[in-house]
Structure formats: C-alpha cells, structure tokens
Image (cartoon, rainbow, N blue to C red):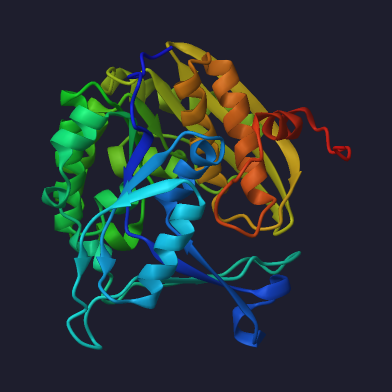
Amino acid sequence: MMNVRKNVKYAVACLSSMGLRITPENRMAVHNSNRFVLQATSAETNVLNVTSALGPTCLVMTRFVAGSPMAAFIKAQLRARNIAFEGPDVPQGGPWGYRHQFNIADSGFGLRAPRVWNDRAGEVGRTLDAADYDVERIFGTEGVGILHLSGLIAAMSPETTKACLALAQAAKKYGTLVSFDLNYRATFWKGREAELADAFHRIASVADILVGNEEDFQLCLGFKGPEAGGKDLAGKIANFKEMIEQVAGKYPNAKLYATTLRQVISADHHLWGAIVRADGAWHVEEPRDIDVLDRIGGGDGFTGGLLYGVLQGWDGAKCAQFGWAAGVLAASSLNDYAEPADEKQVWDVYAGNARVQR
C-alpha cells in the first residue's frame, strides 16, 4: 500500500505536549469522588502505544519541566510503554511558571456522560520548538518509519504550529511517511482561523495518511460533509464517502484517508465503525455495538492500529479492521490508550471472540 522506510530506530515518532490525566476510581464523577488515579497521557502518544506495545520502539519529541516530580512520573511511564523521549528540561521559572497540563476527566456511567476539564495554564508544551531536536540524526541517521502529527499540537500555539510544519518537512526529506490526525479544537482555533487554515493545508498537502471525523474535515480543511453528532451512522456512510472523496481530490499526495463512526447510546454502550479509503478503494467497518469502560482514547487507538497496519505492509481492509479493533481495545481500558498483549488479542476483539484465553 505504502513504502515504509526499513531498518529504522523508531517505528513511529510524534511531537507532543505530555500531560497527566486524573480520573476518579470506580467511574465516579469528579465532584463527588475522593479517590483518583493518575496517568501520563497525550493524544499523540496514545496513538504510538499500539505499535510500542507490540514491540517496535517509538519516539515522542516533547519538553519537560526541570526538577518536576510530574515530569519524572511522565518519563517513567513512557519508559514502561516502550516510548523513547527527547526534549529539553525547561526551568519552571517559579511557582507560577511552566508545568505539565492536567486533564481531569471521569469515565461517565450509564446516562451520566463523561466530563472533561482541561487545566492548561502554564503548559510547557505550548513552547515546543523543532530546534530542540536533532532532526538530521533522528530522521536521517537513526530513521523513522512514520511521523504522526496531531491537529491538537499543530493548533496549540504559534510556536507548536511552526514546529509541526518544520518536522513535516524534515520527515519528507528523509523518506519518512507523514500521518496527520486533524483533531479539531475550537478553543485553539479562536482568533487564529486564517493562520491555522493555511498551516493545516500545508501539512495535509504533504501527508501520506489523513485521519479525521466529520467535524475535523469540515472545520479544519473547509469541506462539506455530514452533520456532526453521530446519529443514523449507517445511513450517512455515503455522505462520509462523498466528503472523503472531496478530501482526496484536494490532497492527492495521501494514499490513505480514514474516519471513525461513533454513535453514543450511553456512556457504556456505543455503535463503533470506520471508513478507510486506501489507494482509491473503500473499506467500511459497519457500526457495531461495543461495550465501553472509558471512551477517551478510542479514536487514538483506531489511528494507532491503522498505523501499525501500514508499518506491517497490510492492505487497506486489514488496516481498517485492526484499527477498528484497537479502538475497541482502548475503550475497554481505563487507560487513555490501547495496550495490546499481542496481535492475536486485537484480532480476537475484531472477531468478537471474548472466550477466556488459556
């Protein structure tokens, strides 16, 4: 499907602002819980985790707060997840200076929806700079199979926008595939609409893999598509295909375009599907009923599974299947990411085989 660079040190690399998620135990709501679980997280490393869990080493380019116990915690969790990291330790600058962002989120339960509160004041990741990384060594000497960029980071600040553009150029110079998940965030775009529309267009123009939901493609790249909201998914598949055809016409460099389909029945019960267009052929995973323990990271799991399939040289149908199942695996965990024990576990999810494994 796509020629992935071989004999590389890093299967997938990303640029990310590492943060911490605080989650109540036992699916309680935040405001009436007094016991919480802490995990290191970011949308971009969530994507890497499917590949890193299955063996190949991945890399996150980031920044840390010097001397911070939270930075030490993040580094320890990344090591445990087979994700290498590079980036400077930035002085905090006093108690009101830099820190790692907090994502305070419960999982929801039944008809009580999950609630997310992002506390990003002083976020060190807003200062990410491509000059912090030896791109000649990382992409040239050591090698990277896929560079994964997220619209969340591309829109976070003027500095991170420039960093994403620079890394995309470096990746293309050395034959690294570029994956771009549009990941629209309205608050990040406010007041920067024209600037970000241009930047996203430039990244999408060089991307080999483009991922987004109906809202992402419409609001980031200006295409017409189905109404956002996830109702009557099966009836809208033709509309999704029409939207992706528009995207493919404007951004022909990409060989793979993908979107997820999600309809929320309750916090514990979703319909989950996917559409992939690879080398001009369509591969549709019709929405299926899935049980959900925690929905956060399901889309990242899908993208991570998709990229793992690209690395393996699988065709579009197999990539779509593995991506769908990796998203389900992420939704079955209280972590923000899918962490498969092996490929078989993912394929068992796809097959609906929940029998005990002995």
Q: Is residue 30 left or right of residue 95?
A: right
Asked which quadrant contains residue 32, the reply is bottom right
* Quadrant for the N terminus in the image: top left
Image x and y of residue 150, in percent: 34, 45
Establish if 134 lies above or below 305.
below
Please, which residue is most extreme toward the left here? Answer: 131
Q: Would you say residue 273 is visible in this rendering?
A: no
Q: Is residue 55 left or right of residue 340?
A: left
Q: Nearer the viewer, residue 255 or 88?
A: 88
Image x and y of residue 17, in percent: 32, 59
Q: Would you say residue 102 is visible in this rendering?
A: yes
* Quadrant for the C terminus in the image: top right
Tell me how many marks there are: 0
Image x and y of residue 160, in percent: 20, 54
Q: Nearer the viewer, residue 77 or 191?
A: 77
Q: Residue at x 55, y 27 (%)?
A: 275
Establish if 280 lies above or below 256.
above
Q: Residue at x 88, y 40 (%)?
A: 356
Image x and y of residue 177, in percent: 31, 25
